Image (cartoon, grey):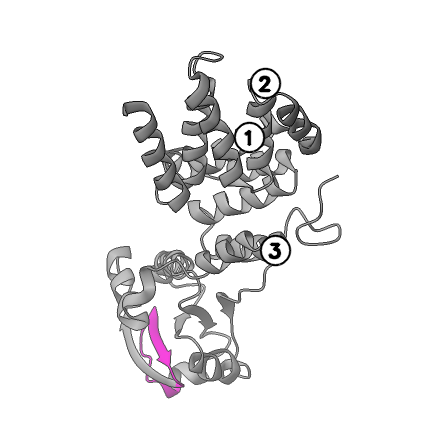
Amino acid sequence: MAISLFGGASAKKPEIAGDLIKETTTHTFVADVIEASRKVPVIVDFWAPWCGPCRQLTPVLEKVVKAARGAVRLVKMNIDEHPEVAGQLGVQSIPAVFAFKNGQPVDGFMGALPESQVKAFVQRLVGPGANEEPGIEEAKAAFDAGDMGGAAAQYAAIMQGDPENVEAIAGLAKCYIATGDFGQAQQTLALVPPAKQTAEAYLGAKAALELARKAGPKPDIAALERAVSADPRDWDARFKLAIALNAKGQRQQAMDHLFEIVRKDRAWNDDAARKQLIELFEAWGAKDPMTQAGRQRLSSLLFA
């Protein structure tokens, strides 16, 4: 039975606190904007329900802020209900947007700008690191350390701000794969839009799921090891052992067994071991050091 990644009945749909976008009032403005901006830049959108340009701008602001993945926050203020702060800032027309940093207004604009200009505004505010993937490296480190719950929570937090982030979706799917929940892994991968399904991260996670399904949720590694030990040329057992070891994260050992088959009997089962190595490399990703070393090793073996 697969372990819960997030605990309790809510394991399938985690609630991740982000506060990337919120409404504020006159009484909460100091906490939501002034104090919050000492930790991360805050954009304030002054709007009103009757304002047509506001209805055009606000969705653009929300989209760009979500895409920044936590590098900036958006606070919306209805000036019909809460006019005091807008008056203090000298707002005479809406939409009016102010950016706060370290407790002070540092930039702003009036009117509904196109998305490209809103992106440039946010880029100026958050600096050159805005295009980085905050949290991805931390999630990968947690995954590599065997902390599936921590990795899954980090990936889910990134997806909250950017629901189509392929790296995060693929990473979360791999967390489910590691716990044997192949069905949830498949559902998670389905969140990747068709236009992004050529991304390496998606293809890698998809290949990893296919490999895990080959191995099954509970492969009997001990029995396979005994079979190989009894007959080192039992290629079928060695092949199955390689798949099972990869599913358990023992990638080097898995690769070694497949290379042994290629070295001793490449033609076995229609070149199955070499083909399986290629699948492993696809699942691990082209930039993975294990993939790079494996491809070099395979080239040396095949073309020696």
Disc 2 from disc 1: Cα separation? 12 Å
Looking at the image, tell me whether mark 2 or mark 1 is earlier in sequence order.
Answer: 2
Disc 1 from disc 3: Cα separation? 23 Å
Disc 1 crowd, CA 10 A, few/some/many (<14, 14-19, 20+): many
* x and y, in percent, of residue 203 in the image: 42, 34
* x and y, in percent, of residue 116 in the image: 25, 56
Looking at the image, tell me whether mark 1 or mark 3 is earlier in sequence order.
Answer: 3
Looking at the image, is 276 positioned above or below residue 28?
A: above
Callout 3 amino acid: Asp
Q: Is residue 32 left or right of residue 199?
A: right
Q: Which mark is residue 298?
A: none
In which quadrant will I find the N terminus?
top right
Task: Determine the residue positioned at 72% across, 54% down.
Answer: 7
Q: Does 117 lie within the magenta span?
A: no
Residue 165 seen in the figure: no
Residue indicated by mark 1: 242
Looking at the image, is 160 positioned above or below residue 218?
A: below
Please report the bounds of the magenta region as a residue range: 88-103
Callout 2 amino acid: Asp
Task: Determine the residue positioned at 48% across, 60% down.
Answer: 138
Looking at the image, is 27 positioned above or below residue 152?
A: below
